[in-house]
Image (cartoon, rainbow, N blue to C red):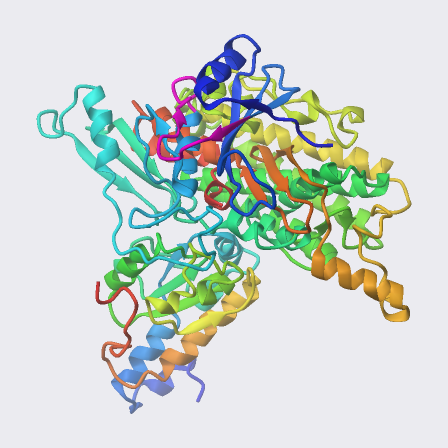
């Protein structure tokens, strides 16, 4: 199963996207990326192609639009006037590929530093060519237009600029925010990311499919297994294979457990920022117990690398049900105790209710997904709107907020943990016996006994290790409901065992893009809580 | 000698060097600054949480200003973009100071051998202890703290450490 992009002329791109949004109802711009055709084995009409990924307002359907960029210096018309999320998406494409976007308000580098020369995702940029950065930018080039637009002047209005991060205890990772303050109130904000840019996409182009799995672990390292599953699932869709039921159920159980521990760390850290240290212990300690279970199962606490294309490394161990039940009890205890302390706590409620609310239409415009979008009252959860892995057969609820403020974003996560635990309990009852991996010798490694015991098994193993899993030529966008929202992988295959291009659609990237806008008119202390509630994970934001 | 029996110390004279006394005090009162960037920072959170409890080794006073700290814990990947900030933080710390590189990325760049990742923080600042792992278990981080304690006990005299170190960002 591959995605079928609609080809569009560069000159009609803007009207096509506008039409898609206004007439066809594709209101959520998921991602914009490019492909460099330099190393293609066949002639292509242009070196660069742009891909626009849009989701329909019913959240069931995804449509890809493809544009050939005839001249990257001239580029194409920016769609940032149609979608708020396009602003940073286009900046990233400009940074990584050097494609220009006409009428973009602030087309400058996003992930790489300001002294960087060249565009690293171009095929002729050598992967190991690092460039030292000597100074950080002051970001005033972004702040100045914001102040001008509000008719504010640094001196006349007696404003103060406060810099938060990138190494700041409350920035939850390497995020830098610049805030212009009038008294205690933020009047304008700008954010800078890229401090944890680790070249995920370039590394993917240099490794075969199974070798990429450890890299996916480190995208959202708070729920590493989910990234494993999302990536494997996308490649399996391209291969047109489906896991046996036991494999699927193991994935469901581990994905939901990962969702729970991801939310646990988000809430623990968020409440710690507010001074609720007791909550931190109650929420963080059961997470440690979950790590014990995961390390017993996969060998690693945090970065598990448990999945493989077409299945996983091994089956669950004997007695896993008892361990998992024990953890669920402990997590439930932690959540209950924590909620007892905050539900009727005035400090908790007064500090975050009606802080930085995001309306439903704004959230869609910013490209929000996951708990942050649901907090704004939008019923979008891939497990409901486009169910995969038997999610439609489980009895659980979608948790929806009403106001979209910091309070809703946190409480949606609290309730989602309970829903995920419901799914785990049902899946534990329903999990069948049988195989965990697809039975295809071109995808799954043979048993050790076959590798050591016969020439066929040995050659099979050798070919899989050296060449990798060969994925048919084509392109595909696969989406997964991860802990922070829609985690998508857009993969282009040239038929070999190494992907031609991999693009991650990271939920956190779009949340942080909106962050400087939603903290305006609130105080610095509120901004810290808002950042905590958005749950920005630098690993997947910067990749 | 039973030190808890305090009256025995009434008349006692202890001879030692001033360095030994100060190093003995420093040993159990390291103040770490955590430069947490990625996955390793999550494992540092576990190290500080109650199960592993770094305060058993006297290093729980986590400082968020480098000017208060004497132990820099670099937990996570450091990119070229981040490098000048790490250097600035290191320079702001008062002497004597120690540095732990937690995990593969901080030690060598790890499996991010690419255009954006610094190939080990020792390219820009001196490192005292390297911790292997991706990420290391909390026990390994605790072991690194103990290693620093052993090292500083042997510190001969008060002077600025690592004066001969020349990092890639030192001359720019």
Which residue of the protein is positioned furthest toward the top in this rendering?
A23
User: Tag count in the figure?
Assistant: 0
Which residue of the protein is positioned furthest toward the left in this rendering?
A156
Left or right of A189: which side holds A351?
right
- Give residue B152's position: percent from left, percent from top: 36, 78
Position of A350 relative to A360 (above/below): below
Foreground pick, A127 / A132: A127
- Give residue A155's position: percent from left, percent from top: 9, 29
- Give residue A368's position: percent from left, percent from top: 50, 26
Quadrant position of residue A233? top right
Left or right of A399: which side holds A148?
left
Please indicate, yes or no, whether residue A486 appears anywhere in the rendered image. Answer: yes
Q: Residue at x 83, y 66 (%)?
A: A458
Position of A87 relative to B84 (above/below): above
Magenta stretch encompasses residue A101: no
Q: Residue at x 64, y 55 (%)?
A: A211
Foreground pick, B144 / B107: B107
Magenta-highlighted residues: A66-84
Foreground pick, B12 / A504: A504
Left or right of A501: which side holds A289?
right
Per the picture, the main secondary structure of the magenta-coloured stretch is: loop
Q: Residue at x 27, y 64 (%)?
A: B169
- Give residue A538's position: percent from left, percent from top: 46, 44
Which corner quadrant holds the N terminus of chain A? top right
């Amino acid at each position: 199963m591959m995605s079928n992009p609609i080809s569009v002329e560069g000159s009609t791109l803007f009207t096509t996207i506008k039409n898609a949004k206004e007439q066809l109802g594709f209101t959520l711009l998921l991602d914009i990326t490019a492909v460099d055709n330099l190393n293609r084995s066949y002639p292509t009409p242009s070196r660069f192609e742009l891909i626009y990924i849009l989701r329909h307002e019913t959240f069931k359907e995804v449509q890809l639009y493809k544009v050939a960029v005839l001249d990257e210096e001239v580029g194409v018309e920016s769609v940032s006037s149609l979608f708020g999320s396009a602003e940073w998406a286009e900046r990233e494409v400009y940074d990584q590929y050097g494609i220009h976007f006409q009428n973009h308000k602030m087309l400058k580098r996003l992930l790489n530093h300001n002294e960087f020369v060249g565009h690293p995702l171009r095929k002729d940029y050598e992967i190991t060519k690092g460039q030292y950065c000597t100074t950080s930018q002051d970001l005033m080039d972004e702040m100045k237009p914001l102040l001008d637009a509000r008719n504010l002047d640094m001196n006349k209005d007696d404003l103060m600029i406060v810099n938060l991060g990138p190494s700041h205890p409350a920035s939850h990772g390497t995020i830098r925010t610049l805030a212009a303050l009038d008294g205690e109130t933020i009047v304008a904000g700008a954010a800078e990311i890229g401090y944890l840019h680790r070249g995920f996409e370039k590394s993917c182009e240099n490794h075969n499919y199974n070798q990429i799995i450890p890299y996916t672990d480190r995208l959202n390292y708070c729920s590493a297994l989910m990234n494993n599953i999302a990536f494997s699932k996308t490649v399996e869709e391209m291969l047109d294979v489906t896991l046996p039921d036991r494999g699927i159920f193991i994935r469901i159980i581990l994905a939901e457990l990962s969702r729970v521990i991801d939310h646990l760390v988000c809430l623990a850290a968020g409440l710690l920022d507010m001074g609720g240290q007791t909550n931190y212990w109650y929420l963080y300690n059961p997470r440690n117990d979950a790590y014990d279970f995961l390390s017993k199962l996969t060998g690693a606490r945090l970065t598990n690398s448990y999945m493989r294309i077409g299945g996983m490394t091994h089956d669950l161990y004997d007695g896993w049900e008892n361990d998992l039940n024990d953890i669920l009890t402990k997590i439930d205890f932690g959540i209950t105790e924590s909620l007892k302390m905050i539900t009727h706590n005035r400090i908790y409620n007064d500090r975050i209710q009606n802080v930085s609310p995001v309306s439903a239409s704004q959230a869609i415009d910013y490209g929000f997904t996951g708990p942050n979008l649901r907090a704004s009252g939008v019923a979008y959860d891939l497990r409901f709107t486009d169910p995969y892995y038997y999610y439609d057969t489980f009895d659980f609820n979608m948790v929806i907020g009403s106001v979209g403020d910091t309070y809703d974003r946190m409480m949606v996560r609290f309730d989602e943990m309970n829903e995920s635990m419901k799914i785990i309990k049902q899946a534990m009852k329903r999990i069948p016996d049988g195989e965990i991996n697809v039975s295809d010798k071109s995808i799954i490694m043979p048993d050790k006994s076959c590798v050591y015991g016969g020439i066929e098994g040995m050659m099979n193993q050798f070919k899989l290790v050296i060449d990798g899993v060969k994925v048919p030529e084509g392109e595909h966008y696969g989406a997964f409901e991860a802990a922070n929202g829609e985690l998508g992988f857009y993969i282009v295959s040239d038929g070999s065992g190494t992907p031609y291009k991999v693009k991650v659609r990271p939920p956190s990237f779009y949340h942080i893009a909106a962050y400087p806008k939603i903290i305006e008119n609130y105080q610095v202390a509120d901004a810290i809580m808002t950042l905590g509630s958005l749950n920005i994970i630098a690993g997947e934001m910067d990749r | 000698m039973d030190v808890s029996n305090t009256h025995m110390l009434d008349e006692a004279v202890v001879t030692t060097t001033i360095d030994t006394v100060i190093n003995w005090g420093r040993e159990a009162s390291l103040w770490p600054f955590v430069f947490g960037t990625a996955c390793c920072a999550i494992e540092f959170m576990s190290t500080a949480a109650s199960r592993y409890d770094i305060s058993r080794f006297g290093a729980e006073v986590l400082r968020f200003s480098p000017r208060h700290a004497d132990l820099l814990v670099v937990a996570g990947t450091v990119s070229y973009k981040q490098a000048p900030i790490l250097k600035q933080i290191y320079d702001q710390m008062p002497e004597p100071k120690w540095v732990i590189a937690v995990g593969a990325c901080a030690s060598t760049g790890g499996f991010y051998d690419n255009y954006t990742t610094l190939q080990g923080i020792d390219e820009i600042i001196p490192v005292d202890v390297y911790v292997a792992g991706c990420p290391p278990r909390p026990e390994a981080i605790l072991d690194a703290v103990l290693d620093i304690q052993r090292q500083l006990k042997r510190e001969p005299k008060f002077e600025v450490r690592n004066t001969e170190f020349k990092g890639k960002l030192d001359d720019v």
